[in-house]
Image (spheres, rainbow, N blue to C red):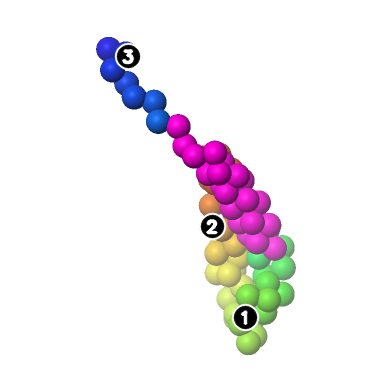
């Protein structure tokens, strides 16, 4: 039964891209969580959002995506 399974390997570059994406998302997510007002201005907002906890929630999601990319 196991002899019928096909093993497909991923391209060599995909691992490097996933690691780069993990580092990028982790850094950006941590920046948003640690400095929400500053990160909103860096991102392009004219002024920081009134409800910074929502912006920090976005940072948490980005951080979690980074962890997921690292696991993949």
Depth check: 30 or 25 in front?
Answer: 25
Measure how far apart labels 3 and 2 are at the Cα level.
Answer: 38 Å
**Marks 1 and 2: in contact by CB < 8 Å?**
no
Q: Mark 2 points at which residue?
A: 61
36 sits to left or right of 72: right
What residue is shown at x 47% (from left), y 37% (from top)? 10
Ranked by sequence position, the earlier of labels 3 and 1 is 3
Of tags 3 and 1, the one toward the viewer is 3
Residues packed near mark 2 inside 10 Å, few (<14), some (14 to 19) or many (20 plus): some
Residue 41, relative to residue 65: is it above or below? Answer: below
Q: Name the residue under label 1.
A: 44
Residue 25 magenta-highlighted? yes
Depth check: 21 or 68 in front?
Answer: 21
Ranked by sequence position, the earlier of labels 3 and 2 is 3
Element class at badge 2: helix
Question: What span is colored magenta in the figure?
Answer: 9-31
Query: How far from the left and from the top, in percent, is residue 52?
Result: 61, 73
Q: Name the residue under label 3.
A: 2
Residue 58, relative to residue 52: is it above or below? Answer: above
Element class at badge 3: helix
Residues packed near mark 3 inside 10 Å, few (<14), some (14 to 19) or many (20 plus): few
| Count of numbered badges drawn on the protein | 3
Query: How far from the left and from the top, in percent, is residue 47?
Result: 65, 85
| Helix, strand or loop: magenta stretch | helix
Residues packed near mark 1 inside 10 Å, few (<14), some (14 to 19) or many (20 plus): few
Residue 7 visible in the current orientation: yes
Q: Quadrant of the N terminus?
A: top left
Of tags 2 and 1, the one toward the viewer is 1
Measure how far apart labels 2 and 1 are at the Cα level.
Answer: 19 Å
Residue 12 magenta-highlighted? yes
Measure how far apart labels 3 and 1 are at the Cα level.
Answer: 53 Å
């Amino acid at each position: 039964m196991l002899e019928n399974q096909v093993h497909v390997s991923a391209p060599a570059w995909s691992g490097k891209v996933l690691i780069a994406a993990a580092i990028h998302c982790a850094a950006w997510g941590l920046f948003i969580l640690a400095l929400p007002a500053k990160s909103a201005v860096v991102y392009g907002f004219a002024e920081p959002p009134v409800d910074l906890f929502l912006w920090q929630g976005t940072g948490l999601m980005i951080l979690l995506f980074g962890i997921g990319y690292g696991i993949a």
